[in-house]
Image: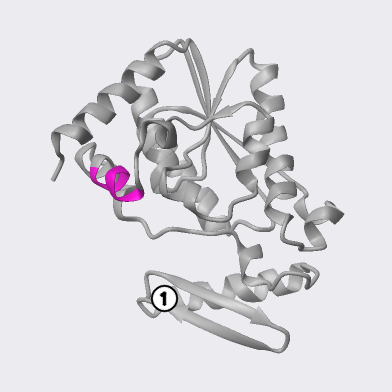
Amino acid sequence: MQTEADTQRLHELEIRLQGLASLAVAFSGGVDSSFLLAVAEKIKPKKLLAVTVASEFVPSREIEAAKKTASLLKVDHICLSADILGNEEVVQNTEERCYHCKKQIFSLIRSAADDLGIKTLLHGVNLDDLKDFRPGLKAADELGFLSPLAEIGFTKKMIRENARLLGLETWNKPSQSCLATRIPYHVRIQKPDLIRVDRSEAFLRKLGFAQVRVRCHGKTAVLEVE
């Protein structure tokens, strides 16, 4: 149920976006970025672009889902490709892996936006995300990405409710994390391990589990399902 405070937050978000002539949204296709993109489309800026970055860390089904959502919202959408496994700072898999990965991804988005004359970059981080260890947020800040959902005070729960009221199919989509998170820190990230994790999780989803994590520990794996 939407409260008066929720309505005020949504109004504040719309006002903030209305002051921007051209926008590019880092678009994963998850509930947060889908909600942000939907609100941005609603206020009709002169130029609005959704940008998705494909890599070895993102299952292909997530890229296809992002394409579908952008199409339903009737927003211009481009999909870029990042050679993440070619980035040694990422492959080393230290605690700063996410920073180096996001730096590469957000740099690609920044470059694409610059080429199209788009000045404002947004990403869908929410207030709850700020409580977690997320070194990738530093990369977003360094490259000038704005995080209006977090700044206004949207929690994940609030975003889901607003997305539901907007009729977004993604409103109850389970939270996703990149495949690299299934590999323990300080274990080099290799493509065969990512493929095994992806295939294993896809199999478990076919069995009816909505939330799935297959964590790789050498020759063994730890399954987390809901």
Task: State the extent of the magenta-drawn residues as a range.
Answer: 156-161
Viewed as shown, does residue 99 lie left or right of 28? right
Q: Does the rendering let one see residue 42? A: no
Q: Which residue is at a point 63% across and 26% down the rendered structure image?
A: 144
Specify whether residue 193 is painted magenta: no
Q: Is residue 45 visible?
A: yes
Q: Position of residue 162 (x, y in %)?
A: 25, 40
**Vertical position of residue 206 compared to residue 99: above or below:** below
Residue 99 drawn at (x, y percent): 70, 48
Q: Residue at x 59, y 51 (%)?
A: 134
Q: As displayed, is residue 11 above or below residue 54?
A: above
Q: Position of residue 219 (x, y in %)?
A: 71, 89
Residue 222 in the figure: left or right of residue 186? left
Q: Position of residue 203 (x, y in %)?
A: 49, 78
Residue pictured at 44% horizontal, 40% vertical? 33
Q: Is residue 189 left or right of residue 43?
A: right
Q: Is residue 158 magenta?
A: yes
